[in-house]
Amino acid sequence: MRRLRLRLPLLLLFTIAAVLCLLFLPSRRSPPPEPPLPCGAAPSDATAGRWVPTPEPVPAPLYTASCPFHRGSYNCLRNGRPPLAPLSWAPARCAGGTNVVPRIDPAAFLTAASGRRIGLVGDSLSENLAVALLCALHSSDPDARRWKRRGAWRGGYFPRADVTVAFHRAVLLAKYTWQPVENPEEIQKDGKKGIYRVDVDIPADEWINVTKFYDVLIFNTGHWWGTYKFPKETPLVFYKDGKPIEPPLSIPDGLKLVLKTMASYIDREAPSTTLKLWRTQSPRHFHGGEWDHNGSCVTDRLLKEHELDSWFDPRFGGVNKDARTVNSVIQEALAGSGIRLVNLTYMSEFRADAHPTTWLGKKDAVAVYGQDCMHWCVPGVPDTWVDILAAQILHYFKQLGKR
């Protein structure tokens, strides 16, 4: 009995001690859930949604035909095209498709990007995007001035926030040079005037030294990778390690190799804190023929979703199939890299109404070049691209600040 009486107080003490330990142990609560991504910042926001009338009151465009960063052939207002209908993109993720991607707030964007540099590298479709971004930001900083350094083709410096935005024109991304036939008599034999040598493992001079300069890099290529740009008289010939690749590569296979080597270069050379984005293809909207065979896009009608495949699916072999074809190559080449894919193709496929078409600003331009059903009016669809990219860039800067 005495032993039992002694054990009872000990058991009671142990019990009390255990309870106290449980009460005062640090709480192992799970961290609070991450807030949802802002509308436009999720990868799916451009690939699932619809165009809707811009909610009332419809704001005026951020910039006009007088923006100093304009390119003439994109400046549809100055060239006389009637203004496009005010439409906004409503991602399915954003309140079930009832909210639209918010328009960029240029002042807030410049403040958040203070001291940073944004570079776009690629072809004229990247320039189309760059013009829209430059003009949007100019609306908040009228003291912005043109900036063309480090090989930039077009750019702007915004002194109020010390922000630089520039476009580097590198249509193939890889270095390519013209090599004419040395003996003119050889031209008469096979019609070949020379070759464009493409060094698949060397970036073009226009951007080879900028990967450490920019805090955000946005790439694209694809629109030049076709025989209409490089016919048999002036073909692309691919080199690696300074030597011709044997057997010779076709243009599609050359594109695949360039994409892989350029992605590897970007991963290797750009700092880990640099936001690296790759913009997918911009769809064309030629109807009734190719660009050089009376193709037209004079319309104010958006395509319906059930029409998209017949216009763009490679299985149907239409004149606008290139975007999806190249996108599949891009997706495969970038798999496993540190480059984020920004898919702007789907949302743009609807907008057959938004190209410069015949309003090109130069006399006889249509007779010489055909209608422009590839590039986009600005203001126009590229402004929605800007809104989506701005949402993603600002979210990245915010997350970077938490590290």
Image (tube, helix red, strand yellow):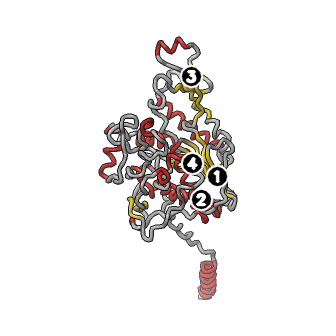
Label 3 with label 1: CB-CB less than 8 Å: no
In what element is the residue under mark 2?
A: helix
Quote the CA–CA distance across marks 3 and 1.
39 Å
Label 2 with label 1: CB-CB less than 8 Å: yes
The one nearer the camera, 305 or 397, is: 305
Q: What residue type is labelled 2?
A: Leu
> Which residue appears at 58% of the width and 39% of the height?
170
Q: Which of marks 2 and 1 is nearer the N terminus?
A: 2
Quote the CA–CA distance across marks 2 and 1.
9 Å
Q: Earlier in the sequence, mark 4 or mark 2?
A: 2
> Which residue appears at 56% of the width and 69% of the height?
31
Q: What residue type is labelled 1?
A: Gly
Q: Which amino acid does label 3 sit on?
A: Pro
Q: Earlier in the sequence, mark 4 or mark 1?
A: 1
- In the rendered image, residue 330, in percent from the top left (x then y), is placed at 48, 41
* Marking on residue 218: 4
Residue of label 2? 137
Foreground: disc 4 or disc 2: 2
Foreground: disc 4 or disc 1: 1
Residue of label 3? 244
Label 3 with label 2: CB-CB less than 8 Å: no
The one nearer the camera, 176 or 106, is: 106
Quote the CA–CA distance across marks 3 and 4.
30 Å
Quote the CA–CA distance across marks 4 and 1.
16 Å
